[in-house]
Image: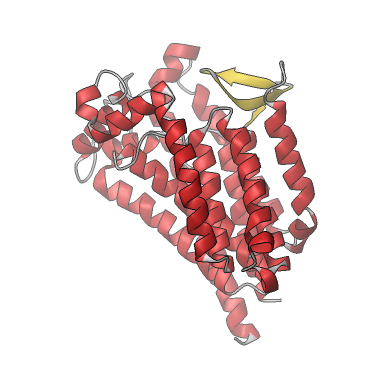
Amino acid sequence: MTKEKQAKSHVANERFLVVGTLLLLGIGVVMVYSASSAVALERFGSDTYFFKKQVVYALTAIAVLIICRHIPYPFYRKMAYPVLAVAFLMLIALYFPGVGHPVGGARRWLRISGVSFQPSELARLALIIYLAYSMSKKQDKIKVFTIGFLPHAIVLASLGALVVMQPDFGAAVMLALVAWTMLFVSGVRLFHLLTALAAVLPIVYYLLIHVGYRVKRLASFLDPWRYESDAGYQIVHSLMAFGSGGVTGSGIGNSYQKLFYLPEPHTDFIISVMGEELGLVGICFVVGLYVMLVWRGFVVAMKARDLFATYLAVGLISALGLQVCINLGVAMGLLPTKGLTLPFVSYGGTSLVMNAAAIGILMNISARQAV
């Protein structure tokens, strides 16, 4: 590819990534206000409580995106182990009194000087950077079990165990899916990957069956209407929101299910409120934006200058795409309930910032193609 074509490709990638991200952030800010206003008014006496925070989070995410866009991606190669170490320390710190902030019986948040942060989000980015660095360095021996698979599986298992202990089964599943995708793309033997999957399934089964609320979630997934007053409550009202939205929706602000029927409608199930207010047309537009981001992300990966950049881009865009698919699948009753937000749209600062960092890194990888 000539330099001129490379430059045109970079410009196209950057435009698609920036426009898609900014549109999703804008939609997210509007929908967070619409979905949370009633809840915020009841809890905090102000219908703009979550909206104001989301605006700050969105502006912070944009700043992080710009910063990461201008950091040369080879820098992350040097930072692979330090970032991984920080992620481990943060996950461990959750269990220290006064540092880890328990919410609903789970320890998923660090709170320092009034600022909350979810370490599992950093752990995902740290794992992606580490795998990209390690696999590119060991590429000539990637099919050797003790070199290409075992060390990476040990790191994944260690991070996954700390996340499951929070407990956050959904985040642990995300770590495993992203790692599996990256290992597959790098050329790790499929036999090793499938054998590991078979070995992990009994552990997953145990974690699902021996925890009461997870059993209820599985049962409600199979027949949500049977458990509509209990474990299936969220799914039933999510489906009702989608159904009442029709093709064009009831209009922004006119959702009925957000009025104390859908629990936390501005977080995991914000897409349900969007389905009710924006209808099929609005959902298709938002999904189209995600498809555009994933498509351009893989274009960046395929045209990257070196293996580290390729694997880094694959990991980052796979994580984004998988999270979108899982969130949509849960909201539409196609997957069991998991606590994963919708990237760039759901309320929350950690997810917004980390996903914005991922887009900024992708843009830098694309920019260096044209150098």
Q: Is residue 155 visible?
A: yes
The way the protein has been coloured in the rendering is secondary structure
Looking at the picture, how far across and down is residue 105, in whole percent? 53, 17
Looking at the picture, how far across and down is residue 207, in whole percent? 47, 32
Q: In which quarter of the view is residue 111 placed?
A: top right
Q: In which quarter of the view is residue 137 placed?
A: bottom right
Q: Nearer the viewer, residue 227 or 44?
A: 227
Compared across the picture, whether 212 is left or right of 181 comes to left
Looking at the picture, how far across and down is residue 224, in whole percent? 24, 29
Check the picture and name the quadrant holding the N terminus.
bottom right
Looking at the picture, how far across and down is residue 342, in whole percent? 45, 41
Up/down of 355 relative to 276, above or below:
below
Q: Residue at x 32, y 21 (%)?
A: 259
Up/down of 147 relative to 36, above or below:
below
Compared across the picture, whether 187 is left or right of 269 comes to right
Up/down of 48 relative to 345, above or below:
above
Q: Nearer the viewer, residue 231 or 287?
A: 231
Check the picture and name the quadrant holding the C terminus.
bottom right
Q: Nearer the viewer, residue 189 or 164?
A: 189
Across the whole image, how many numbered discs are drawn on residues? 0
Q: Is residue 128 visible?
A: no
Q: Residue at x 29, y 23 (%)?
A: 233
Up/down of 59 relative to 46, above or below:
below
Compared across the picture, whether 36 is left or right of 125 comes to left
Q: Residue at x 33, y 32 (%)?
A: 218
